[in-house]
């Protein structure tokens, strides 16, 4: 009997739910235009949110492609005021031998996005992410090999392990193990394995592993490598750092009877610190975080989603007049408040499901564009995270359904039966206050987006138009080998200067506009017996003339012996300020560890911006040659082209380069384009914010349009009577518009200080930034008000100019 009764109740529940769904679908179709507005607005918000959710999941998946990566840590060093990811070359070996919890340690040097020439037979490819490693790399990083043996692959010098994609490019479908490849047309390596690509993103992408052939340079003064360790068992960062610092102190720093505790209490002490590999990309202890943009985008997507949900809720409340009699009849027929709430929530859930389907379709359409724009690979069907992603989307959908539908359901279900059947649909002060509050919140989101768009545009304009302090126009940046940059420079310079249109040729180790390869480290120069941390840049005599950098004091470099052999220096304004000298010309400074070799300051150049606007211009010391106890290489050749026939000059340079470096195809860019590329991430952010802002504004406009239409329809009789009593169209328009315009104005007033604080926080990430005036925020508020006035005014004017006879007859 009990089982039969339970079955009866279950069957009754199924029938009731089915009835609710049918009724909900009829109601959706019954007010199709407003349902479409509802669903499209919500779909836009959901689509934006899902894209950002995919991006956020991608960003948070860095270095989670293997469980073993949880044991891998990068060891960095704090040296005075600098936090360096490069550490002394012998550090890895010291930690592997003396830190008991270290299963293995490795030192490595990555080329990053700097491309090197890789050749196999007749095939030559410029390849990035070439990593020079020791024999322990594959013991620390859990890469798998599709060909070769990971245990022995890197045991011998001059061996290489290559990625699957490069293997296919160079050797086709053949097994490359045992074959040779040549790097930069110099060193020959034997391929001992093929690296399987990791299943997710990593902060240290690898295309080629080459066994370091320069073990003899494994000295404590060599800071060319990064150090990574793999732990045997988990420890906190504090425990790891305490242990490795004790090992480092005992094995290298200790020179007297000072205890480790006394040493650590010295504020100038050199200290090691660690970053878990899984946190390096997004949450490093020092340096910029890549997660900042993702978190900002997530916040904006949430705001957009909230705007869509509020729009949905407002429209549902606005339709309460149409649904009021339905509620009254249902209550008379015995429906309880719980059943009514369930009915209206079913309608909301149905529309949310349709909206989510439209959102996913929209995401599928734009995902390829997003991937190409950001150079990432977002997909719904991730190998490890698909279930997690679907769960996140489902939870988001539930939250949106509750947010969008709960209050309208409670609002509609509380109508008094007697009143609504008599035609009284008033919702009371509470309902009006909440509805108005939701309108204010919705327009607050729009005002915030408009302000953000205007601020980003202002900062972009500032960066594009501000004087950089140098001229990169028609200046070629040419990649060159170390031989060409050093011993072969004079011959190469004379060859290029003999070509038509070439007005200057120079070199530098720090090229303006180089974002990926620029050296931002400083060293301790000495002046008057005190250390001053400044950057050292090696240049040639004509460097400042090539870039039209102004000389403020003293003289420029010449062919004199002292200038050409690192006995003189030119410094920038920031360096003069660092030294505290109004006129530093004639003063003597010393490279670190070279107190016996004086370097005289002969000139001061104007500060110029080399690295974009995020970083303050560094104090820099410019010298020629490597004759002051410190060798520096890298950088590029700069060629200034004069005249309008740049194409002919470039063709002549390309022909000459075939003789200068016959084994290397010439690779060049232009400095002004490189510097402009530094702003590319902000240009993308501007596009995204503009898109989000446009969606938010459209949602607000459609919602306000629909709300205005509903409430004007509700006051049709009042409008007709007022017109009969002599009210003008202008008075009626003002009457109908006033309340909504007040609400939008309130949104502007509340949002402006919040927007000001948020954009100021963003601008703090720039060392050089645009000055924000009150007019910018006033403009954002006025634009929002104008949009609202046009939206509301259209409906109000149409209602105010309608024939009152028709209005009263219809009522």
Image (cartoon, grey):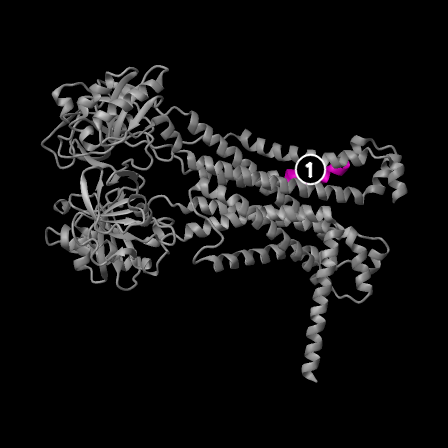
224 is within the stretch colored magenta: no
Residue 36 on image: x %, y %: 68, 47
* Circle 1: element type: helix
Residue placed farthest to the bottom in the image? Answer: 1
Q: Is residue 184 left or right of residue 380?
A: left
Q: Is residue 388 left or right of residue 605?
A: right
Residue 512 on image: x %, y %: 31, 29
Which residue: 62% across, 48% down? 42
Query: Which residue in the protein does label 1 denote?
Result: 741
What is the magenta range? 735-746
**Towards the viewer: 783 or 101:** 101
Which residue: 50% across, 45% down? 367
**Towards the viewer: 585 or 581:** 585
**Towards the viewer: 195 or 20:** 195
Residue 64 on image: x %, y %: 37, 56
Which residue: 76% across, 38% down? 736
Q: Quadrant of residue 214?
A: top left
Q: Is residue 286 left or right of residue 323?
A: left
Mark 1: few, some, or many residues within 10 Å (few <14, many ≥20)?
some
Residue 646 on image: x %, y %: 35, 19
Magenta portion: prevailing SS class: helix
**Towards the viewer: 256 or 297:** 297
Which residue: 45% across, 41% down? 372
Q: Quadrant of the N terminus?
A: bottom right
Above or below residue 351? Residue 613 is above
Question: Is residue 750 visible to the viewer in this orientation of the structure?
Answer: no
């Amino acid at each position: 009997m009990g089982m039969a009764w339970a079955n009866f109740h279950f069957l009754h529940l199924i029938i009731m739910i089915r009835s609710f769904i049918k009724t909900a679908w009829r109601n959706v179709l019954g007010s199709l235009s407003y349902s479409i507005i509802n669903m499209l607005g919500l779909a836009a918000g959901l689509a934006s949110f899902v894209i950002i959710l995919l991006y956020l999941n991608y960003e948070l998946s860095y270095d989670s492609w293997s469980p073993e990566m949880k044991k891998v840590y990068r060891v960095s060093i704090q040296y005075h005021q600098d936090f360096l990811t490069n550490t002394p070359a012998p550090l890895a070996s010291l930690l592997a031998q003396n830190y008991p919890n270290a299963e293995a340690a490795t030192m490595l040097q990555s080329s990053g996005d700097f491309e090197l020439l890789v050749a196999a037979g007749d095939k030559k490819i410029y390849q990035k992410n070439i990593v020079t490693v020791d024999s322990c790399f594959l013991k620390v990083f859990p890469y798998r090999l599709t060909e070769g043996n990971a245990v022995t692959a890197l045991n011998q010098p001059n061996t290489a392990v290559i990625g699957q994609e490069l293997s296919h490019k160079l050797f086709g479908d053949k097994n490359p193990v045992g074959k040779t490849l040549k790097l930069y047309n110099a060193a020959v390596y034997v391929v001992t394995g093929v690296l399987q690509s990791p299943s997710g993103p990593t902060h240290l992408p690898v295309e080629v592993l080459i066994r370091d052939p320069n073990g003899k340079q494994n000295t404590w003064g060599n800071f060319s490598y990064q150090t990574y360790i793999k732990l045997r068992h988990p420890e906190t960062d504090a425990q790891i750092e305490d242990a490795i610092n004790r090992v480092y102190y005992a094995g290298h720093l200790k020179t007297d009877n000072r205890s480790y505790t006394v040493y650590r209490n010295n504020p100038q002490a050199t200290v090691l610190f660690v970053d878990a590999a899984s946190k390096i990309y997004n949450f490093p202890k020092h340096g910029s975080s890549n997660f900042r943009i993702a978190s900002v985008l997530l916040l904006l997507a949430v705001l957009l989603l909230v705007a869509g949900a509020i729009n949905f809720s407002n429209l549902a409340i606005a339709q309460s007049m149409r649904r009021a009699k339905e509620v009254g009849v249902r209550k008379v027929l015995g429906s309880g408040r719980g059943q009514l709430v369930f009915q209206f929530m079913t309608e909301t859930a149905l529309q949310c499901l349709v909206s989510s389907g439209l959102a996913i379709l929209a995401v599928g359409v734009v995902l390829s564009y997003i991937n190409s724009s950001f150079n990432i690979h977002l997909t719904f069907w991730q190998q490890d995270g698909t279930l997690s992603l679907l769960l996140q989307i489902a939870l988001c959908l539930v939250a949106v359904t509750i947010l969008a539908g709960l209050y309208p359901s409670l609002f509609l279900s509380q109508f008094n039966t007697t009143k609504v059947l008599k035609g009284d649909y008033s919702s009371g002060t509470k309902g009006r206050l909440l509805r108005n509050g939701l309108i204010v919140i919705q327009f607050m989101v729009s005002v915030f987006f408009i302000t953000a768009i205007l601020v980003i545009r202002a900062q972009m304009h500032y960066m594009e138009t501000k004087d950089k302090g140098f001229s990169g126009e028609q200046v070629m940046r040419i990649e060159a080998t170390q031989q060409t940059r050093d011993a072969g420079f004079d011959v190469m310079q004379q060859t290029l200067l003999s070509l038509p249109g070439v007005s200057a040729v120079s070199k530098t180790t720090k090229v303006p506009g180089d974002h990926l390869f620029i050296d931002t480290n400083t060293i301790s120069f000495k002046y008057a017996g005190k250390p001053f941390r400044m950057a050292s840049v090696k240049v040639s005599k004509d460097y400042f003339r090539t870039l039209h950098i102004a000389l403020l004091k003293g003289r420029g470099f010449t062919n004199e012996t002292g200038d050409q052999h690192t006995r003189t220096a030119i410094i920038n304004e920031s360096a003069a300020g660092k030294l505290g000298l109004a006129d530093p010309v004639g003063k003597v400074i010393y490279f670190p560890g070279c107190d016996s070799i004086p370097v005289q300051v002969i000139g001061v150049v104007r500060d110029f911006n080399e690295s974009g606007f995020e970083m303050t211009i560094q104090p820099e010391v410019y010298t020629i040659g490597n004759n002051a106890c410190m060798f520096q290489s890298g950088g590029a050749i700069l060629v200034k082209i004069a005249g309008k026939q740049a194409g002919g000059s470039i063709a002549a340079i390309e022909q000459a380069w075939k003789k200068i470096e016959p084994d290397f195809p010439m690779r060049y860019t232009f400095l002004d384009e490189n510097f402009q590329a530094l702003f590319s991430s902000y240009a993308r952010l501007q596009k995204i914010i503009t898109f989000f802002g446009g969606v938010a504004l459209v949602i607000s406009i459609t919602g306000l349009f629909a709300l205005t239409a509903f409430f004007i329809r509700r006051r049709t009789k009042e409008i007709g009577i007022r017109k009969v009593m002599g009210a003008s169209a202008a008075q009626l328009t003002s009457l109908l518009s006033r309340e909504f315009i007040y609400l939008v104005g309130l949104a502007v007033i509340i949002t402006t200080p919040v927007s000001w604080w948020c954009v100021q926080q963003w601008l703090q990430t720039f060392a050089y930034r645009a000055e924000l005036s009150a007019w910018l925020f006033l403009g954002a508020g006025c634009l929002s008000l104008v949009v609202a006035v046009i939206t509301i005014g259209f409906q109000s004017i149409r209602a105010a100019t309608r024939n009152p006879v028709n209005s009263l007859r219809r009522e």
